[in-house]
Image: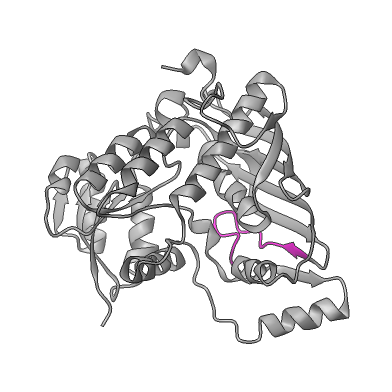
Amino acid sequence: MSRIFKVAVIGGGIGRAHIAEGYSARPDLFEVVVLCDIDPVRLGNVGKQFGIARQVASFDEVLAMPDIDIIDICTPPSLHLEQCLAALAAGKHVVCEKPLVGSLAEVDRLIAAAHGAKGRLMPIFQYRFGNGLQKARHIIQQGLAGKPYLATIETAWNRDAAYYSVPWRGRFATELGGALLGHAIHAHDLLSYLMGPVASVFARTATLVNPIEVEDTATASLEMANGALASLSVTLGSARELSRLRLCFEHVTFQSALEPYAPANDPWHIIPNSKAAATAIDAALADWRFVPSRFAGLFAAMHTALVDGSELPVTLQDARNSLELVTALYHSAEQRLPVDLPLRPDHPAYGSWLPEPFRG
């Protein structure tokens, strides 16, 4: 019989999706026993929907609960660092929504805290999970794709005034960034997940769609460490929402599904460039087992790692790599210059990627 982890979800916004797609889908692995939210209406509505009897407004109260195994943090980004540190200090496993924290300095502080902690911390990158993308990753890992050439990554979503009516959104002090940080960060993580680390970036950002502080439109040109080239584009002003990845390798081209919030799902187009490549790919997928999408796949893989001590499906180093790319993109856009990675602690943006006027 599998161990059932007791979960407290902090924040009923995106936390609702964690419960609906992930925890409730696997009652043999998880039980959400506590919901914490400072909005009493949302607290009551989400708690009632999922039958969560223990409903509290105090994060500190959750920290003191001895029966909680996992604290799942789904609060505004500016709260993540202190809440993650407190949950680790309380001996809990921690799940934290993106962006994990607000700078490379902060993520390094969190990595140090997690190193000796009783619990383990898993950042959220649920877009890695879906049957189509995982097949593509398997082909790449088996060495069948060959040399990487080119990637184009598009995030075309829509966010209007109603979305930014939530007080913490659209402001550097609380959201910490815009489309690059809170929206396209998923697709950009998938670029590195499939094609390896980034070596250099040149980015442009703009605020064109909404009257907000943070950017809602951006483009970037990248050179990967393996020599491949990539382009990134994001807007929050698209009439039709989609997320699209196209990756060209020596022996195969991959093109994702277009679902804006589940691009890893089938159908992915896997296009071999020869009969030999097609035969090898078919053989590699002959015994393929379906991979569930988003939080269902992510949390099931997390459960396995927590039980057997294996590597978490998303690691703190993964989150650091993502935030290093974010930092480089923002610094490039602000300075209007290319930026090489990795970024060292003496880099001027190591302590904050925020524009100079918004740094504390």
Q: Position of residue 143 (x, y in %)?
A: 72, 69
The residue closer to the viewer here, 207 or 147, is: 147
> Is residue 289 toward the left or the right of residue 306 in the image?
right
Q: Is residue 261 magenta?
A: yes
Viewport quadrant of the N terminus: bottom left
State the image quarter where residue 268 is shown.
bottom right
Residue lying at the far top of the rendered structure: 357
Q: Residue at x 13, y 44 (%)?
A: 61
The residue closer to the viewer here, 253 or 93, is: 93
> Is residue 88 toward the left or the right of residue 241 in the image?
left
From this view, report whether residue 274 is shown above or below residue 111.
below
> What's the colour scheme?
one colour
> Is residue 209 toward the left or the right of residue 316 in the image?
right
The residue range painted magenta reads 253-265
Residue 39 visible in the shown view: yes
Residue 207 visible in the shown view: no
Q: Residue at x 80, y 79 (%)?
A: 278
State the image quarter where residue 149 is shown.
bottom right
